[in-house]
Amino acid sequence: MMTRKKSFPGYLNTAAIASYVVFCITQAALARDFSQQAPALNIQQVVDRAYNHYKTITDGSNASYISYLAKANTKLYGIAVVTTDGKIFEAGDAEHLFPVESIAKVFTLAHVLKVKGAKTVQNKIGVNATGLPFNSALAIELNHDKLTGSPPPGNPLVNAGAIATASLVDGKSLEEKWNMLLKEASAFAGHSLMLNKDVYDSEMADNQHNLAIAVLLKSYKSLYADPTETIDLYTRECSYDVTAKDLAVMGATLANGGTNPLTHQAVTDAETSARVLAVMATAGLYNTSGEWLYNVGLPAKSGVGGGIVAVVPGKMAIAVYSSPLDAAGNSVRGQLAIQSIAQDLGVNIFKIQMQK
């Protein structure tokens, strides 16, 4: 059998193809090696990038219905991340004090869950989202009329549910109840927190709507202490000062199963932390909680003081302070910054992290 000799151009073509194949294999190998060796963006770089990217955002406006908050400096903007092994990353005004407002509901809920138990919270308050504004009285009526699956208070993170939660705090006097809540919040933060009396006085002078909610709950046998005293306690819990760093430590304590990653104090237990995070996922950003979870994939809680904290269970918490709010009462820059950080770090709890 005769073999056919290749022409010189044929040898060139074969050599060219072989060289191209070798080139592609080499490039793929180099790219793979580089991807394995090149460090991903570290947390501080991610925080700095989010801070710089959104510091010029001017959308939103301060909460005008609370005189103290209406005067907040809209230029202040700070980010903090605290990991469960105690590392801290900051940018901007991360240590500026501001009123905690509704974020306090998270830590009061943690206290009541630990003391009263999960069934009490579910049966007396409810854990479903209301789908209505955080200060809605209509939600109470809908729940009372059995048009939803919740008791009248609805959820511990809306005003009605938070007021009912406050009414479940044990104590022989208002001062004893308040000292208990402040002590526990301070343990979450890792240092003593202080009541901002100007905020407290401002809100007590204009809290008729919340008092009406308390009285309505009482009429439906869904408030478990005196309405006036309960509103005082509720207003105090919303009036202590925190920083973005404080919120990140408090959130990281929940992420760490209830143990503060800086002080190593067991503030609460892992089961309580898990239930608190579940409620945060359900209603942490008021009536836009579903959109937040859909887009970001992290349990979070906002407050009309401009703070917001998101928790990555087992890993970290991300907190931001920026006072201008959207129509639902959530910090505009806070939401953008946390979403950016969460995406850069790949911490959406609903995404499977594939092993490489």
Image (cartoon, rainbow, N blue to C red):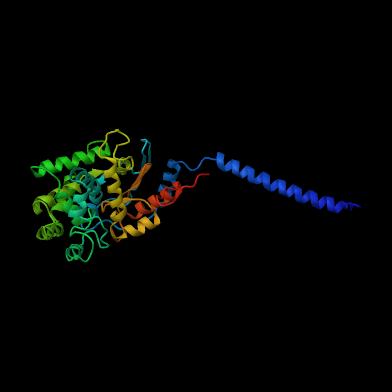
Please give the name of the residue rendered at 38% of the width and 50% of the height, measured from the top-left corner. 338
Q: Nearer the viewer, residue 11 or 52?
A: 11
The furthest residue to the front: 1
Find residue 143 and report its horizontal and vertical position in percent: 19, 63
Find residue 172 and report its horizontal and vertical position in percent: 8, 42
Q: Is residue 108 above or below residue 70?
A: above
Please give the name of the residue rendered at 72% of the width and 49% of the height, measured from the top-left corner. 21
Q: Quadrant of residue 223?
A: bottom left
Q: Nearer the viewer, residue 298 or 353?
A: 353
Q: Is residue 106 above or below residue 184?
A: below
The furthest residue to the right: 2
Please give the name of the residue rendered at 33% of the width and 50% of the height, measured from the top-left corner. 299
In-image side of 317 versus 151 (left or right):
right
In-image side of 54 versus 125 (left or right):
right
Q: Quadrant of residue 159?
A: bottom left
Q: Quadrant of residue 250?
A: top left
Find residue 273 and report its horizontal and vertical position in percent: 28, 44
